[in-house]
Image (cartoon, rainbow, N blue to C red):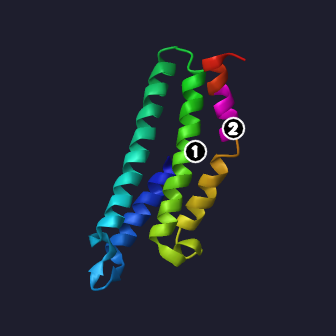
Amino acid sequence: MGLAQAALEDSIAYLKQRVQFGHPLADFQHLRFKVADMAAQIEASRALMYHVCTQIDSGARCDKEAAMVKYLAAEMAEKVTSEAVQIHGGAGYTKDFAVERHWRDARLTKIFEGSSEIQMRIISDELLGR
Protein backbone atom coordinates (compact mmCIF):
# COMPACT_ATOMS: atom_id res chain seq x y z
CA MET A 1 0.00 0.00 0.00
CA GLY A 2 2.92 2.29 0.64
CA LEU A 3 4.08 1.94 -2.97
CA ALA A 4 0.63 2.78 -4.26
CA GLN A 5 0.32 5.74 -1.88
CA ALA A 6 3.71 7.09 -2.99
CA ALA A 7 2.74 6.69 -6.65
CA LEU A 8 -0.51 8.54 -5.99
CA GLU A 9 1.26 11.38 -4.22
CA ASP A 10 3.88 11.62 -6.98
CA SER A 11 1.11 11.67 -9.60
CA ILE A 12 -0.79 14.43 -7.82
CA ALA A 13 2.36 16.57 -7.62
CA TYR A 14 3.12 15.92 -11.30
CA LEU A 15 -0.42 16.75 -12.41
CA LYS A 16 -0.32 20.05 -10.55
CA GLN A 17 3.11 20.97 -11.92
CA ARG A 18 2.95 19.83 -15.58
CA VAL A 19 1.22 22.22 -17.99
CA GLN A 20 -0.28 21.29 -21.36
CA PHE A 21 -2.43 23.46 -23.62
CA GLY A 22 -2.04 26.32 -21.14
CA HIS A 23 -3.48 24.35 -18.20
CA PRO A 24 -2.03 22.15 -15.47
CA LEU A 25 -2.73 18.49 -16.21
CA ALA A 26 -4.70 18.48 -12.96
CA ASP A 27 -7.42 20.47 -14.75
CA PHE A 28 -8.23 17.60 -17.13
CA GLN A 29 -11.20 15.52 -15.99
CA HIS A 30 -9.92 12.18 -17.25
CA LEU A 31 -6.73 12.53 -15.22
CA ARG A 32 -8.68 13.73 -12.19
CA PHE A 33 -10.83 10.60 -12.42
CA LYS A 34 -7.71 8.40 -12.61
CA VAL A 35 -6.46 9.98 -9.38
CA ALA A 36 -9.85 9.49 -7.71
CA ASP A 37 -9.91 5.82 -8.71
CA MET A 38 -6.35 5.29 -7.49
CA ALA A 39 -7.16 6.88 -4.12
CA ALA A 40 -10.35 4.82 -3.71
CA GLN A 41 -8.51 1.56 -4.43
CA ILE A 42 -5.80 2.41 -1.91
CA GLU A 43 -8.32 3.31 0.77
CA ALA A 44 -10.35 0.13 0.19
CA SER A 45 -7.25 -2.01 0.60
CA ARG A 46 -6.21 -0.06 3.68
CA ALA A 47 -9.65 -0.51 5.26
CA LEU A 48 -9.56 -4.29 4.73
CA MET A 49 -6.05 -4.42 6.16
CA TYR A 50 -7.12 -2.53 9.29
CA HIS A 51 -10.10 -4.85 9.69
CA VAL A 52 -7.88 -7.94 9.48
CA CYS A 53 -5.34 -6.42 11.88
CA THR A 54 -8.10 -5.72 14.38
CA GLN A 55 -9.30 -9.31 14.11
CA ILE A 56 -5.78 -10.66 14.61
CA ASP A 57 -5.22 -8.33 17.59
CA SER A 58 -8.38 -9.74 19.16
CA GLY A 59 -6.98 -13.27 18.85
CA ALA A 60 -9.04 -14.46 15.88
CA ARG A 61 -7.60 -16.71 13.14
CA CYS A 62 -7.65 -14.80 9.87
CA ASP A 63 -5.73 -16.94 7.41
CA LYS A 64 -8.24 -16.42 4.60
CA GLU A 65 -8.69 -12.72 5.29
CA ALA A 66 -4.94 -12.10 5.57
CA ALA A 67 -4.47 -13.84 2.22
CA MET A 68 -7.23 -11.66 0.79
CA VAL A 69 -5.44 -8.51 1.97
CA LYS A 70 -2.11 -9.66 0.53
CA TYR A 71 -3.71 -10.60 -2.77
CA LEU A 72 -5.87 -7.48 -3.16
CA ALA A 73 -3.18 -5.07 -1.99
CA ALA A 74 -0.57 -6.53 -4.35
CA GLU A 75 -2.96 -6.44 -7.32
CA MET A 76 -4.07 -2.91 -6.39
CA ALA A 77 -0.50 -1.67 -6.01
CA GLU A 78 0.46 -2.91 -9.44
CA LYS A 79 -2.60 -1.30 -11.01
CA VAL A 80 -2.20 2.02 -9.19
CA THR A 81 1.52 2.29 -9.89
CA SER A 82 0.91 1.40 -13.53
CA GLU A 83 -1.63 4.24 -13.73
CA ALA A 84 0.97 6.55 -12.18
CA VAL A 85 3.44 5.63 -14.92
CA GLN A 86 0.70 6.33 -17.48
CA ILE A 87 -0.05 9.72 -15.90
CA HIS A 88 3.62 10.65 -16.19
CA GLY A 89 3.61 9.67 -19.86
CA GLY A 90 6.82 8.50 -21.50
CA ALA A 91 8.85 10.11 -18.72
CA GLY A 92 7.14 7.85 -16.20
CA TYR A 93 8.92 4.88 -17.73
CA THR A 94 12.33 6.46 -17.17
CA LYS A 95 14.35 6.72 -14.00
CA ASP A 96 13.71 10.48 -14.00
CA PHE A 97 10.62 9.86 -11.85
CA ALA A 98 10.17 7.55 -8.86
CA VAL A 99 6.96 6.07 -10.29
CA GLU A 100 9.06 3.79 -12.48
CA ARG A 101 10.62 2.26 -9.36
CA HIS A 102 7.27 2.14 -7.56
CA TRP A 103 5.82 0.16 -10.47
CA ARG A 104 8.75 -2.30 -10.55
CA ASP A 105 8.55 -2.80 -6.79
CA ALA A 106 4.75 -3.20 -6.87
CA ARG A 107 5.05 -5.85 -9.56
CA LEU A 108 7.42 -7.75 -7.31
CA THR A 109 4.85 -7.83 -4.47
CA LYS A 110 2.74 -10.15 -6.62
CA ILE A 111 5.62 -12.62 -6.70
CA PHE A 112 7.50 -12.66 -3.39
CA GLU A 113 6.40 -13.83 0.06
CA GLY A 114 3.47 -15.73 -1.37
CA SER A 115 2.55 -14.98 -4.95
CA SER A 116 -0.94 -13.85 -5.88
CA GLU A 117 -1.63 -17.40 -7.02
CA ILE A 118 -0.62 -18.79 -3.62
CA GLN A 119 -2.89 -16.27 -1.91
CA MET A 120 -5.77 -17.35 -4.14
CA ARG A 121 -5.01 -20.97 -3.26
CA ILE A 122 -5.22 -20.17 0.47
CA ILE A 123 -8.49 -18.31 -0.02
CA SER A 124 -10.07 -21.00 -2.18
CA ASP A 125 -8.95 -23.78 0.19
CA GLU A 126 -10.66 -21.96 3.06
CA LEU A 127 -13.84 -21.51 1.02
CA LEU A 128 -13.98 -24.86 -0.76
CA GLY A 129 -11.79 -27.14 1.32
CA ARG A 130 -8.67 -28.80 0.10
Q: Position of residue 115 (x, y in %)?
A: 69, 40
Work out whether residue 18 or residue 6 is closer to the camera in this orientation and state it.
Answer: 18
Q: Quadrant of residue 33?
A: bottom left
Task: State left or right for residue 52 relative to residue 36.
Answer: right
Task: State left or right for residue 14 relative to residue 96.
Answer: left
Where does the magenta region start and end? 115-122
- Residue lying farthest to the bottom in this orientation: 22
Residue at image coords 56%, 28%: 66
Let me know if residue 114 appears in the view: no
Q: Is residue 116 magenta?
A: yes
Residue indicated by mark 2: 117
Q: Position of residue 104 (x, y in %)?
A: 63, 60
Q: Please tell me whether residue 81 is drawn above or below residue 70 in the rendered image.
A: below
Residue indicated by mark 1: 74
Q: Please tell me whether residue 110 is drawn above or below residue 22 in the rendered image.
A: above
Work out whether residue 121 or residue 42 is closer to the camera in this orientation and state it.
Answer: 121
Mark 1 crowdedness (10 Å alpha carbons): few <14, some 14-19, many ≥20: many
Answer whether labels 2 and 1 touch (C-beta < 8 Å): no
Q: Please tell me whether residue 125 is drawn above or below residue 21 in the rendered image.
A: above
Q: Quadrant of residue 46?
A: top left
Q: Main secondary structure of the magenta part?
A: helix
Marks 2 and 1 sit apart, C-alpha to C-alpha, by: 11 Å
Q: Position of residue 18 (x, y in %)?
A: 36, 78
- As helix, strand or loop, the secondary structure at mark 1 comes to helix
User: What amino acid is labelled 1 in the image?
Assistant: Ala
Residue at image coords 38%, 52%: 37
Q: Position of residue 94 (x, y in %)?
A: 59, 75
Residue at image coords 70%, 34%: 118
Between disc 2 and disc 1, whose residue precedes? 1
Nearest to viewer (mark 2 / mark 1): 2
